[in-house]
Image (cartoon, rainbow, N blue to C red):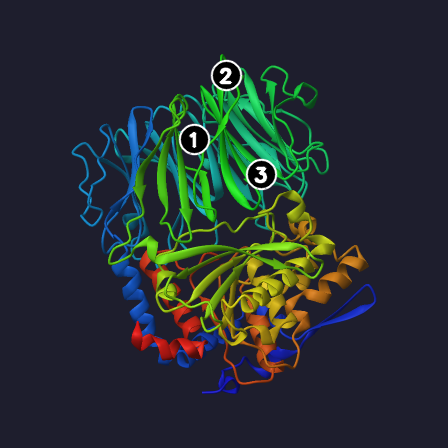
Amino acid sequence: MSDADHLSAPVAKRVPRTRTFHGDEVVDEYFWLLDRDDPDTIAYLEAENAYTEAVTAHTKALQDEIFSEIKARTLETDLSVPAHRGGWWYYTRTVQGQQYAIHCRSRSEPELPDDATQPIVSPDDEQVLLDENELAGDSPYFALGAFDVSPDGRLLVFSTDFDGSEKYTLRVKDLERDQLLPDSVPDTYYSTAWSADGSTVFYTTVDEAMRPYRVWRHRLGTQASEDQIVHQEDDERFFADVDLTRSEAYIVISLGSSITSEVRVLPADAPGGEFQVLEPRRQGVEYTIDHSGGYFFIVHNDGAMDFELAKAPVASPGREHWSPVLPHEPGRRVVDVHAFAGHLVVALRRDGGTGLHVIPLRDGEPQPGHDIGFAEEVRTVRPGGNPEFDTDTFRLGYTSLATPSSIYDHNIQTRELRLRKRQPVLGDFDPEHYQTVREWATAEDGTEIPISLVRHRDTPADGTAPCVLYGYGSYEASMDPWFSIARLSLLDRGFVFAIAHVRGGGEMGRAWYEQGKMLAKRNTFTDFVACAQRLVAAGWTSHDRLVGRGGSAGGLLIGAVANLAPSDFAALVGEVPFVDALNTILDPSLPLTVIEWEEWGNPVESAEVYRYMKSYSPYENVQPVAYPAILATAGLNDPRVGYHEPAKWVAKLRATATGDRSLLLKTEMGAGHRGPSGRYDAWREEAFTLAFVIDSVPAVKRREAAV
């Protein structure tokens, strides 16, 4: 079957939309695909799915093989490391054959088995709080949003989504009686916070643009129609979030745009009161807070590009009272602070890596601190689940490209690290069989771009190995090294896997982000190309064996790279890709557009921004050239990147591109931005993608028989 054989929508629906911006006429040939209520749109997407299934039918056996490998390496009946809070041990369990997690607690601490291959036995006093499998029922999609136990442990507020739209129905469960209360609130968003006495729940809702903009107060036992708005955020650039501090002393409303923030606080024992502004918003000033004793601890960038940690008295928390705890140090990005009764833990970034710094508190006053050290260079360390406020133990997560996700407890007094659990990998897996490497690419402007890389030690570095290069590069999000069971199916077939830490992310500090946004956005794309070229020059792979992959804003990266350097890649995978960037950012009525103007610029008002975005937006720059094989995925209910973006992009590629490589679109018709919700469904989806990747690199097909 050829690409020309795909089923298209009726010709009458192909009337383009024409608009003019800044004297430039914009013709959108596939604008009609935005109408998801039109039966022709649904028919088109279903036809594309059928076409993709037909084109990839010859990989079905490989898909099944990879799925079986993922399943065989995964301990399906498993238990998380229990976390202590308020006299209970909280944990989740998974059971073989079931898609979703079971949330539990017990008075006694469950023991993790010495032999990770053995099924987990629950303690005798286990209480099941929520079984996601029962909640999901026969629904093809299910997601749990909020999961928040009240401070006294009596009540649970949770929320559910059955279509991927990210609009959740909020419910409350009486844990002592094991029954749902009548309270029910539809169309809520993720965040919630309890009052100290468990009488009141705060939650958020979204506007028509899917922006969380209202914070509500709900008193248990009342109708949702009686709920009160405690904050409405009218600035369309700002998100609203609500949370309870670990100290359980304050309810916190966090308001933030891409570059500005504001925090409002309310004593948790006075839920009927009014929130007070900690420090009024000022354009370009960002800050977050936590609380311990008589202080708020504040991470901010006011006069500190890479942020610093300060403290302020609870009674007078305004900017004039902030005093440094960890002063600004260029190149050391202070990311976050976690406050406890007797210490602080600060998450840091330095030299492209992550770290944790512990600061003891004596009578509430910060003392000289210490770093938590690890040996591996290419690794990731992050705060773990730490619900208990008064504790001498800090839980953290650790992983690398070769080390499975690991949970450690760090004793603040003795500085001892205790490994609590390492993600089980069944079969003959041995981390010593894999090598992690840090490479550096030189960008067009001379900037050195870090690359994290892993391979099987038997994989040669002579240019013959296939390679997947992953990238993101937006919103200051860092793509730190992580372990993946599914990735082993590539590594054991002779693949190299690499992450390009391109500008626009946060790997190298705030300047790294600013050099890859707005009118510097092209650096993100050219950095990725430079990384691809470095991998080839260093002998890790060759251009005809190289596959690029990225999702969401990373999908924009993939789409831009397809136009910039199509001959540098054998294949490209764009998952829910933001490839119709210009048209989306030009339309304030679409979800999240106004918020995004601080990331990309405002092409509606600025001719310079308009011309710059048009120069890289993937949809506008499709050319009559031979593109690599391309797989684009979408979710029909995606509220973040509309399904129409990859649909339009693939349609234009297929109408314009030369060459004979497959250009495929796969749309999840009952899911959203995150794809399939159940773990087995997600494994099937990943097996499909990896089979496409392997099939796109001819050398791998010759090597499979030897694996």
Name the image quarter holding the N terminus. Answer: bottom left
Residue in front for this viewpoint, 397 or 166? 397
Spot occupied by residue 509 in the image (x, y as percentages of width and height): 62, 43
At 46% across and 77% down in the image, what residue appears? 47
Secondary structure of residue under mark 2: loop
Asked if 429 appears above or below 122 in the picture, the reply is: below
Q: Residues within 10 Å of mark 1 (few under 14, many from 20)?
A: few
Gap in Å between the C-alphas at discs 1 and 3? 24 Å
Q: Name the residue carrying label 1.
A: 222
Residue beneath label 2, please?
A: 293
Q: Which residue is mark 3?
A: 240
The answer to whether the residues at label 1 and label 3 have Cβ atoms under 8 Å apart is no
**Image point (58%, 17%), residue name:** 314
Q: Residue 11 at x, y = what percent?
A: 59, 83
Single out the residue that lies furthest toward the top: 363
| Residue 589 position by quadrant | bottom right
The kind of residue on which mark 3 rests is: Ala
Q: Is residue 452 above or below residue 633?
A: above
The residue positioned 26% from the left and 54% from the top of the image is 98
Residue shown at 44% from the left, 55% from the top: 436
Residue extending farthest to the right is 23
Closest to the observer: 14 or 578?
578
